[in-house]
Image (tube, grey):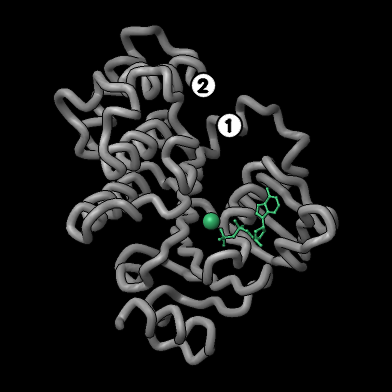
Amino acid sequence: MTLLRVQTASVRYGRRFALKEVDFTLQAGEIVALLGPSGAGKSTLLSLFDGSVAACSGVVHWQERALLSHPRNARLRAMRRMFQDPLGSLNPEVLVLDSVAGAHESLCGSTKAAARLAACNMLEAVGLVGLGVAQRPSGLSAGQRQRAALARALVTQPQVLLADEPVAALDPLAAAALFQLLRREREQRGMAVVIVVHDPTPVPTLADRYVVLHEGRCVDAGPAAELLRSAHPVTRSLCDMSAA
Ligand code: ADP
Ligand code: MG
């Protein structure tokens, strides 16, 4: 089943194009890694998917209907975003546990007790237990904030996770454990993932496909297993940078 379909979509901030005639589809249950140099348009593409920016031309369909014509709350529950800055996903005034439980309560319509239980389970699954969950985000390390933001995104069991550099503050071992969690959510519930990654190295084991953006255009794409062998110069320079 096609969840997201973007056809020749462009996005402009003022007079500058951040995305130019981008085509993209996301099937249920697939994991797509999004790569590209800084400023390539990766975060903007996630914003196009979740409806927080509009295309100035082209088509964005969610489940075969114009994205913005879907009821907002149902869309928010089905498609969860984890921002590049985890503080963008967490209210600074709210305790982490309440923030994760609050997402469950408001979007799943659950009782306070059920939401708290779901939140505790998800916080444990992302490796955040003990004192951390009773803190405000300012009391957490950058890595703990990323875990908390991921828990808040996953607690509603979304059909699609949009994750913007979700492990940038974590060491490779911790990152691998979170990638495993995403793959488990995919195996168990068929969740689809679009994940922006800085480091191409884990992509072949994490994702099914990759897409490379450069200056607002999709310049390279293919099976994740072939990313590190791509001959495209932009992809090559991303791989060589991470190998250096
Ligand atoms: P990436 O995530 O790949 O680093 P972005 O999608 O954040 O790239 O940005 C793509 C381009 O759009 C960049 O040139 C950036 O400066 C510009 N841009 C992003 N967000 C805004 C904004 N809110 N207003 C104006 N320009 C923006
Ligand atoms: Mg970005």
Question: What's under tag 1, amino acid-wise?
Answer: Leu
Q: Nearer the viewer, residue 148 or 139?
A: 139
In the displayed structure image, the side of residue 13 where residue 231 appears, left or right: left
Mark 1 in CB contact with mark 2 (< 8 angstroms): yes
In this rendering, the answer to whether 90 lies above or below 176 is above
Q: Is residue 173 left or right of residue 221?
A: left
Question: Quarter holding the C terminus?
Answer: bottom left
* Image mark for residue 107: 2
Q: Is residue 151 above or below residue 207?
A: above
Q: Residues within 10 Å of mark 2 (few under 14, many from 20)?
A: some
Task: Specify the amino acid type for callout 2.
Answer: Leu
- Look at mark 1 in the image and give the residue it sits on: 76
| Residue 234 on image: x %, y % | 53, 83
* Residue 10 lies in quadrant: bottom right
Q: Is residue 104 visible?
A: no
Q: Position of residue 124 (x, y in %)?
A: 20, 32
**Can residue 202 be seen?**
yes
For label 1, count other residues whose C-alpha is less than 10 Å away and answer few (under 14), some (14-19) or many (20+).
Answer: some
The location of residue 65, given as percent across then percent down, is 75, 43
* Residue 135 vs residue 73, the one in the foreground: 135
Asked if the beta carbon under badge 1 is closer than 8 A to the nearest atom of ligand 1, the reply is no
Is disc 1 placed on a helix, strand or loop?
helix
- Residue drawn at x 51%, y 77% is 222
Q: Front-most of 3 and 199?
A: 199
